[in-house]
Amino acid sequence: MNEASVSPLNVGQTVPDFSLPATSGRTFHLCALRGQAVVLYFYPKDGTPGCTTEAGQFRDLYDAFVAQGATVWGISRDSLKSHENFKAKLGLPFELLCDADETACRLFGVIKMKNLYGKQVRGIERSTFLIDPAGHLAREWRGVKADGHAADVLEAVKSL
């Protein structure tokens, strides 16, 4: 499927169920999280500076997200092995999801053409989606800057 044919979800729509392999030997099933707020943050690549900053800030605010009844999940196209290393290195208390076949990336419309060292490459646009306890897309952030973003998402969770 090419990016032009992707029709991302709109705020207020019910998010369709999907499943992805997760770290710690788990499998993520969106439908299993009904009744909780769900934060899905898409990031380009494990171990890169911006992704490390973003993951560290979600880690540092994780207890506040949990106190608000929210779960946090990071998603990229990296392998589970890469995710496990990234998670261990940063001491992340939440799981990372492997979207190697771009199932969730297509659903949320986060694959974009990006410039990397002067070349056009397909990649994940740093984006976050907040799903309310009823399973509706409550809020989206696209093309975000990593630093300070987790705090913005936490404020939105508090307002649900």
Image (cartoon, grey):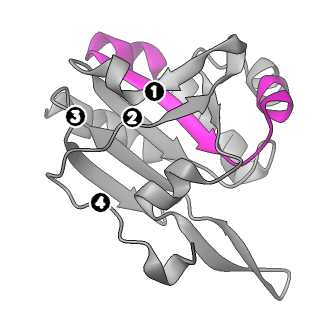
Q: Are marks 1 and 2 in contact (CB under 8 Å)?
A: yes
Q: To which residue does mark 2 refer?
A: 39
Whether residue 54 is visible to the viewer of this picture, yes or no, is: no
The magenta span reads 60-84
* Relative to 138, 152 lies left or right: right
Q: Earlier in the sequence, mark 2 or mark 4?
A: 4
Residue at the (18%, 52%) spot, across then down = 13
Q: Amino acid at mark 1?
A: Val
Residue at the (85%, 28%) spot, across then down = 81
Image position of 57 with respect to 60: above or below: below
Residue 17 highlighted magenta (yes or no): no
Callout in the foreground (3, 1): 3
Q: Are marks 3 and 4 in contact (CB under 8 Å)?
A: no
Q: Nearer the viewer, residue 126 or 112?
A: 112
Q: Nearer the viewer, residue 59 or 136?
A: 136
Image position of 124 with respect to 36: above or below: below
Separation (CA) of disc 2 from disc 3:
11 Å
Q: To which residue does mark 1 refer?
A: 72
Residue 67 highlighted magenta (yes or no): yes
Separation (CA) of disc 3 from disc 4:
12 Å
Which quarter of the image is occupied by the N terminus? bottom right
Q: Residue 9: give its label.
A: 4
Q: Position of residue 107 (x, y in %)?
A: 43, 56
